Image (cartoon, rainbow, N blue to C red):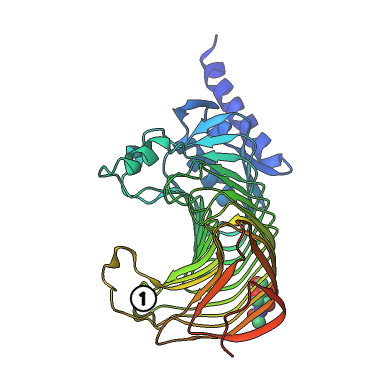
Amino acid sequence: MSRSSNIALPLLFTLLTFIDVSTSSSNVFNVVSFGAKPDGVTDSTAAFLKAWQSACVSAGSATVMVPAGTFLVKGITFTGPCKSKLKFQVAGTVVAPADYKAFGNSGYWILFNRVSKMSLVGGTFDARASGFWACRKSGQNCPPGVRSITFNAATDVIISGVKSINSQISHMTLKGCTNVAVRNVKLVAPGNSPNTDGFGVQSSTGITFTGSTVQSGDDCVSIGPGTRNVLISKLKCGPGHGVSIGSLAKTLNEDGVENVTLSSSVFTGTQNGVRIKSWARPSNGFVKNVFFQDLIMKNVQNPIIIDQNYCPSKEDCPTEQSGVAISQVTYKNIQGTSATQQAMNLVCSKTNPCTGITLQDIKLTYNKGTPATSYCFNAQGTNLGVIQPTSCLKR
Ligand SMILES: *[C@@H]1O[C@H](CO)[C@@H](O)[C@H](O)[C@H]1NC(C)=O
């Protein structure tokens, strides 16, 4: 073989590869082409990052493709914004390291940071947290845990058909996000897994959740300070702790929660249905314009609850009152069964009464031979239609 052909051959290959990529009609960046292995044991973290980085600088809209198979990915941050629209399409399963110590104190498994105009579509994300839960339950000194999928400071995002299982703590969190649509997402962990929230949202605006299922060990959805314009519909919640606005009043200076609607949803065997919860502490936070409507409760311990006296272990707040002002909260067409006699529990702050509460067409029953009851403290508002149990609101 001559010397020149030795050089020409690799050159030809390089050229062909280049032509192939540049002429492909859609810019698909398959993680396997970047070295990821669908065997569930090879660390594919670097390959995922390379695929992302290549897609992210693509001039036209790009797709990061995770094909069928199981891919081991450690803590990873996908940083945006990218040059063009980006679709992250997952057909297979992404698994976390089984050893929870691999995460240290990072707080995140899969983090999308400052992305814009992106969609996350399909796939299963398995954080394999059973070892972590066992550590927590045994009262050992455990790391703080990682959220499975997080979007921080994201805008214009669609999350669709994604499944998250066995998270260490929250399955999916949105923080500082604008305009995010979450559709047909399924979040699953055992009902007794500690602090495995489903969705967590805070400091975000314009967030819609449609058709999701959450079966986990803590809140199905938790809505934190600074959250506005949230619409949740067709949620199936349970097991879990229900939908919670709060905990609020963690800090003195705190942004409020405004314009939250939850509709057409079903709660099954949950600790709470719809809950608003604030620490019994001074705060300038608030909750206003909240609509809970067309909800079915099946054997729920606290179907309707406001708890402004939250002070676990009576630490730091044994004699304080919540500064959070709750107003304009509507409960409409909420039906089903309560697992405890007290189906409605509206305990507002001693210093900041709840105002503008509306109860309309409520039918909650307790099936242990005695009728359901309601309890109010400092709760003012209006009753419309038939209210069962009898309303305790003050006019
Ligand atoms: C309330 O939130 C919904 C859902 O995001 C939005 O469509 C609506 O415009 C908001 N209303 C106000 C008054 O901002």
How many marks the image carries: the answer is: 1
Name of the residue lying farthest toward the top: 1
The vertical placement of 354 against 10, above or below, is below
Judging from the image, what secondary structure is the residue with disc 1 in? loop
The vertical placement of 72 against 186, above or below, is above
- At x 60%, y 62%, the residue is 370
Can you give x and y, in whole percent of width and height, for residue 336 in the image? 68, 60
- Residue 324 visible in this rendered orientation of the protein: yes
Question: Along the line of sight, which residue is nearer the eye, 283 or 72?
Answer: 283
Can you give x and y, in whole percent of width and height, for residue 275 in the image? 53, 67
Image quadrant holding the N terminus, namely top right
Residue 364: image quadrant is: bottom right
> Residue 65 vs residue 223: left or right?
right
Residue 281: image quadrant is: bottom left
* Disc 1 residue lies near ligand 1 with CB under 8 A: no
> Residue 118 vs residue 189: left or right?
right
Q: Quadrant of ligand 1?
A: bottom right
Residue 349: image quadrant is: bottom left
Question: Along the line of sight, which residue is nearer the eye, 47 or 111?
Answer: 111
- At x 56%, y 73%, the residue is 374
Which amino acid type is shown beneath numbered disc 1? Ala
Mark 1, residue position: 280
- At x 71%, y 82%, the residue is 384
Can you give x and y, in whole percent of width and height, for residue 79 in the image? 48, 54
- At x 71%, y 40%, the residue is 23
Can you give x and y, in whole percent of width and height, for residue 327 in the image? 55, 84
The vertical placement of 151 against 371, above or below, is above
